[in-house]
Image: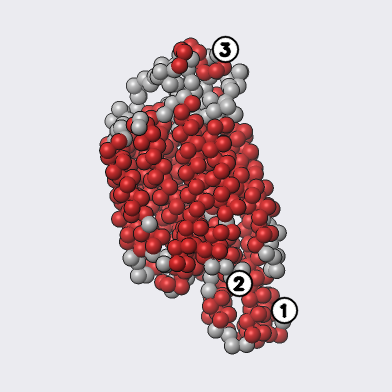
Amino acid sequence: MDRKWWTLIAVCAGIFMLLLDITVVNVALPAIQLSLHSSFSDLQWVIDAYALTLAAFLLTAGVIGDMFGRRKVFAVGLGVFSVSSLLCGLSTSPLMLNLSRGAQGVGGAIMFATSLALLAQTFSGKERGTAFGAYGAVVGGAVAIGPLVGGAITSGIGWRWIFFLNLPIATAAIIITLAKLQDSRDPTPRRIDWIGVVSFSGSLFMLVFALVQGNSKGWGSSLIIGLLVGSAVLMAVFLIAEWRQRDPMLDLSLFRRPAMVGVSLAAFTLSASIFAMTLYLILYFQEVLGYSPFAAGVRLLPFTVLAFLVAPVAGKLSVRVHSRYLMGLGLFLLALGCNLSTHVQPDSLWTVLLPGFIVAGIGVGIVNPVLASATVSVVPPERSGMASGSSNTFRQVGIATGIAGLGAVFLSQIRPETVNALQATPTGRLILAEGGSRLTTAISGSGVRQAVASIPSAAARDTLLNAYRVGFTTTFNHLMGIATVTALVGAIGALALIRQRDFVPSFDPSPAEGEGDVAGGGGAPESSAPPAPPVPSAAPAPPTRPVPEAASPEHPSAAPTG
């Protein structure tokens, strides 16, 4: 087998494991809460601890890959991820689990930051569209089977095995990476930007911590205000440091291209909308409707399977249709799907979500491969590692801030909504009088069914469960409305900012019959747009492959595409 296809296999195996771990964990969260006696904030941190470290180290991991070789660094990431997965499975407390999830994020950052760069350096021309289509299909496949696998494992042999599952996959991927992949690095000397790492990770941690703790500590408290101010100050330090440094962690000059801004916005809004909502979908299925983890995973299949099936088709279309149109369409469909899911009532069946799942699944399937291809196509090849890290950073920042932000709304609304429903009936008022703080704590988390089981009266149990359904569904609809607006902002931004002339051409070094093929996915050129100039970088880089004359607007078959 050609070395390039081994590269695709290794990268897809690593990314499959990484993304599978996210989706299987979502389904297992209620079981983890019962096993480790976790609070709702602990549940948020199971996801956010991973997303925070992944976002904080992605850009640095891209630089390290450029410095020391992407193949070696990718293999190290696989190793770190597998060891931390073992620790997650052995966790005996919420703190141990969340610290291990943070370590997983470091390994995930290393894999994410180098994965697209490995594909970009290996594939060109039409084969790049095929490779990114396969990459998108793997992303969709991990999302598709993750809830099902996670539900089956959690219901069958326990939640700990969702982490142990990573070990054989990681071992196989490491062997392939070290034996078959070709190494590459940025020929320009690089260094690690420690000021950028500390300021960016500190700013993000303070923001998410403030969002998670805002309801319990009080939004006007000195702690929360101090965290928000500190986050803003550290972000300002980060931006100033990146602007002034000769070799920054994130080259801000890349964002002079509107397309880079549009791609980053699309990555953020995709994650901050539907993927941040996954936690609340799982809670709805298990806590409100009473489904087992496996049954909850089955009911997510209409969304996840469609995302999987549409991805390879979108990957093929990305070499014929402009990226701005595909990405804008996908995010618009995602917004429409979220909006269709805002009509859940206390007595609704799960099928009320089916139209939204179908539309949103198609939208995600369109966006994923196009976003992956466009990320490395709007910068010169030698900056692909940084671009890949930047895009995935925006993805993880979207998940972390989305979950924390939606969680703040969730906690601020579900308790009063449920209490109001209880106060509407005599039995409900009695439950509130007798339940005290234990009941309100259960309402604010995901332990209502356990609280219901402890009530001896059948009438009281029904009253509490019905009131919780009212409170949860009302809050859920509000959260889906926020997700709708978020995805719609991404769609508008993609259409307005992702300009075809900003894309950098990537030509097959051995084109058939003397005709250059284009990679990066984006279809026919805009005839009025001249080839994009090189993106300024902190240090001059050696020239890349020369652009042949056929890349001019007079030769559309080889014009820059995105």
What is the C-alpha distance between the residues marked 1 and 3?
Answer: 72 Å
- Residue kind at label 2, given as amino acid type: Arg
Q: Secondary structure at mark 2?
A: helix
Marks 2 and 1, how far apart in space? 14 Å
- Horizontally, residue 362 falls left or right of residue 539, namely right
Q: Secondary structure at mark 1?
A: loop
Q: Nearer the viewer, mark 1 or mark 3?
A: 3
Determine which residue is flagged by label 3: 554
Residue at x-position 44% and y-position 21%:
507
Q: Quadrant of residue 121?
A: top left
Please give the residue where the numbered disc 1 appears in the rendered image.
Answer: 424
Left or right: residue 342 versus residue 245 is right
Q: Residue at x 41, y 72 (%)?
A: 36
- The correct choice, above or below, for 136 with respect to 464 in the image is above
The image quadrant where one finds the N terminus is top left
Tell me how far mark 3 sits from mark 2, CA to CA: 64 Å
Residue at x-position 41% and y-position 45%: 15
Q: Secondary structure at mark 3?
A: loop
Q: Earlier in the sequence, mark 3 or mark 2?
A: 2
203 versus 470 height, above or below: above
**Circle 2 residues within 10 Å: few <14, some 14–19, many ≥20:** many
Q: Which mark is residue 327?
A: none
On residue 415, the disc is 2
First in sequence, mark 1 or 3: give its number: 1
Front position among marks 3 and 2:
3
Q: Residues within 10 Å of mark 3 (few under 14, many from 20)?
A: few
Please indicate, yes or no, whether residue 13 appears anywhere in the rendered image.
yes
Q: Is 82 positioned to the left or the right of 468 in the image? A: left
Q: Are marks 1 and 3 in contact (CB under 8 Å)?
A: no
In percent of width and height, residue 160 lies at: 39, 64
Q: Is residue 394 visible?
A: no
Q: Is residue 274 above or below residue 216?
A: above
